[in-house]
Amino acid sequence: MLTTPHSLVGATIAVLVPNPALSIPLAIGSHFILDSIPHWQEILYPYKITYKTWIRLPIDITLAVFLVNIISTHSQITANTVWLTAFAANIPDFDSIGMIWKPSLKNKLFKGYYDWHCAIQRETSSFWGVATQVIISLGSLSISLR
């Protein structure tokens, strides 16, 4: 799943559960639930970074930052909690280092996690995959900005 829906769900968790000791683990856990929902990315397993990745990433991250900023400025809780929880929701994707730095995949523990994380992905066509992410993002915005 893209960075934006992960970030928005994380920020929404912070709004609903303002205690970082609870919201951060919940945000990390939400990552795996979201990845199991059919979604789209421009690359499929086995992941190979392409020029489309380098186009999508800045757009996706910029959109995530813009929307999380809206949530953090309209929230009754501290902006730090919103930002930290939004960031935490993306931590599981740091295994992407395995696509760039192949020696990391020689570590059995890291490789096991990487393979499992790839296996839980439920990727689908671009139309339906983008639709699910838009719905998740709009739902998160709706909940966190009410």
Image: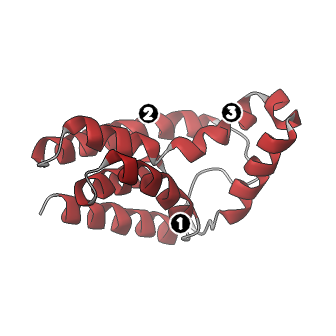
Residue depicted at 43% across the width and 54% down the height: 27
Residue 30 picture location, percent across and down: 47, 60
Mark nearer the N terminus (2 vs 1) = 1
Secondary structure under the numbered disc 1 in the rendered image: helix
Distance CA(mark 1)–CA(mark 3)? 21 Å
Residue depicted at 58% across the width and 39% down the height: 53
| Mark linked to residue 47 | none
Residue 63: quadrant of the picture: top left
Secondary structure under the numbered disc 2 in the rendered image: helix
**Which residue is denoted by mark 3 in the rendering?**
97
**Which residue is denoted by mark 1 in the rendering?**
33
Residue 134: quadrant of the picture: bottom left
Distance CA(mark 2)–CA(mark 1)? 24 Å
| Amino acid at circle 3 | Ile
Residue 70 picture location, percent across and down: 18, 44
Residue 135 picture location, percent across and down: 35, 69
* In front: label 2 or label 3: 3
Distance CA(mark 2)–CA(mark 3)? 17 Å
Q: How does the figure colour the protein chain or chains?
A: secondary structure
Instruction: Give the class, few, some or many, for how many residues have Cα within 10 Å of label 3's Cα (few <14, many ≥20).
Output: few
Secondary structure under the numbered disc 3 in the rendered image: helix
* In front: label 2 or label 1: 1
| Amino acid at circle 1 | Ile
Q: Look at the numbered discs 2 and 3 and tell me whether their residues touch, using CB distance below 8 Å.
A: no
Residue 97 picture location, percent across and down: 68, 33
Is residue 46 visible in the rendered image? The answer is no
Is residue 83 visible in the rendered image? The answer is yes
- Is 76 situated left or right of 91 in this image? left
